Amino acid sequence: MGVSMKKVSFVIPCYRSALTIGKVVEEIKNSMERLSDRYSYEVILVNDFPEDDTFEVIKELAEKDDRIMGINLARNFGQHAALMAGFRYCDGDITVCLDDDGQTPADEVGKLLDKLEEGYDVVYARYCHKQHSAFRNFGSKVNELMTRFMLGKPKDLYISSYFAAKKFVVKEMIKYRNCYPYVIGLVLRTTKNITNVEVNHRERELGTSGYTLGKLFGLWFNGFTAFSIKPLRVATACGGFCATAGFLYGIYTIIKKFLNPLVPMGWSSTMAAMVFIGGMLMLMLGLIGEYIGRIYISLNDAPQYVVREITGKEG
């Protein structure tokens, strides 16, 4: 009795990639032809920047190949929202996510699929030598620390934008309807049966990364406000520390005055303490306000993404 063929859904968020996405799709096609005895496939391209001609290129690709679907979002919602849009339209037994710029090697997808067949639920690509800019490497390092501290990511697990996940993981992820999706957080709260496999990382041939410092900060905020209450616990601990320090300093000042009545109370030290405590209070109130604001926006049913147009399989 033969082994049933599995379907692989490739989900690729596209951002200003009119010049690169065709090459990525061609590489997927060539790679899956080598695995055609085990897998069928589909490609879902989600355009997250409708102001350029990327979706026109996606339309042309979909017209030539009925395994390709294009989704055009109404505006720029961000990479993770674009992934969520793709997840809701894919129907593969396995979902593979990768970048649109060719830096993530589609020709090594077999490594991820083989590792998944060993019994893991999710497999992330680990890059032997990263070819990102210093800015992106810094962002990745901060993201690494944040996911470990806030989301409980295992220390030895490497997270990247190139990964493969089983169908049940994706089905669980798309239940999340909040307008602040964070894919890594959704994966980690679904399963801990995750591993890495090493692949090459290529240099960017065209353009620059779509991630600015502001977008990276927004992504980190999504991660720790949507999937963790640890910042609130840190706020509580800081408040407790400041209150204790203020109380002890007050006792110290009283004792010092009793022992030496001629010692001045110290205007500068009082002001320094007030500024420090006031600053901490404002910081913690701002953090709490961020949580409350996100709850308010979520209760108003702000959309995770809005689809303007679909081309290909269901277009």
Image: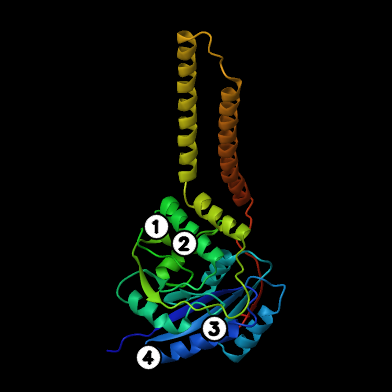
Residue occupied by mark 4: 37
Q: Is residue 202 above or below residue 297?
A: below
Spatial separation of the CA atoms under disc 4 and disc 3: 22 Å
Q: Name the N-terminal-most of marks 1 and 4.
A: 4
The disc labelled 3 sits on which kind of residue?
Val
Spatial separation of the CA atoms under disc 1 and disc 3: 30 Å
Q: Quadrant of residue 312?
A: bottom right
Q: Quadrant of residue 124?
A: bottom left
Q: Name the N-terminal-most of marks 1 and 3.
A: 3
Locate residue 94 relative to residue 118 in the image: left or right: right
The label nearer to you, 2 versus 4, is: 2
Task: Please give the name of the residue rendered at 56% of the width and 40% of the height, measured from the top-left corner.
Answer: 288
Locate residue 92 relative to residue 17 in the image: left or right: left
Most foreground residue, 196 or 6: 196
The disc labelled 4 sits on which kind of residue?
Asp
Q: Name the N-terminal-most of marks 4 and 3.
A: 3
Q: Position of residue 1 (x, y in %)?
A: 27, 89
Locate residue 200 relative to residue 17 in the image: left or right: left
Residue 39 in view (yes/no): yes
Residue occupied by mark 1: 153
Residue occupied by mark 3: 24
